[in-house]
Image (cartoon, grey):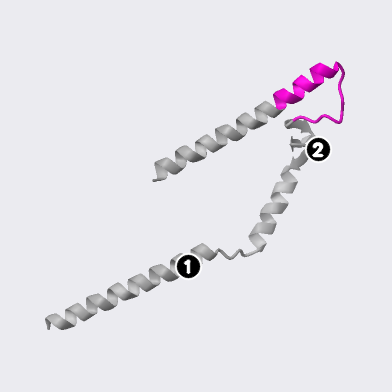
Amino acid sequence: MIGYAGKCLLIVIVMFLGVLFGMQQANNGMLDMKGYHDPSLKGAFTLTDGENNEKEASILGQTVTTKDLEEKQKELEQVESFNVFSKTGKALSDTVTNTAQAVYNWMLELRE
């Protein structure tokens, strides 16, 4: 099961990178067709040097910096998320464990 999920994840990542590569190639083709550089046509993925020698990445025209990622990580750490599936799974496993323990104890009482 883990191998299957790993293969699926790998395929999704390869396909996503293929889409980004294709969009970049389409952008280059549009620039070649026009014959001049149009600043309104942005690449699918670009890396530039920002302030204080920081690297800035632009994905589909939206700039992403390391500061943005750090702020989002801090925000996620502060917010305690509630996962319905996790809580449901824990309740189900507790119920099954308690039921099995009760049946085991009942069987032991019958033997005596």
In this view, 7 is above or below 75: above
Residue at the location (78% across, 32% down)? 49
Q: Label 2: how many residues lie within 10 Å, few (<14), some (14-19) or many (20+)? A: few
Viewer-nearest of labels 1 and 2?
Answer: 1
Name the side, left or right, on which 35 lies relative to 79.
right
Is 42 colored magenta in this rendering?
Answer: yes
State the extent of the magenta-drawn residues as a range.
24-43
| Sequence order check, earlier mark of 1 and 2 | 2
Q: Is residue 33 above or below residue 63?
A: above
Question: Where does label 2 land, which residue?
Answer: 52
Dividing the image into 4 quarters, which one contains the C terminus? bottom left
The residues tagged by marks 1 and 2 sit, at their Cα atoms, a distance apart of: 48 Å
Q: Residue at x 82, y 37 (%)?
A: 51
Q: Position of residue 82 (x, y in %)?
A: 58, 65
Q: Is residue 92 left or right of residue 75?
A: left
Q: Is residue 51 left or right of residue 24?
A: right
Measuring from the top left, give residue 17's x and y in whole percent. Answer: 61, 32
* Mark 1, residue position: 88
Amino acid residing under circle 2: Asn
Q: Are marks 1 and 2 in contact (CB under 8 Å)?
A: no
User: Judging from the image, what secondary structure is the residue with disc 1 in?
Assistant: helix
Question: Considering depth in this image, is 23 or 13 the residue closer to the camera?
Answer: 23
Closest to the observer: 67 or 16? 16
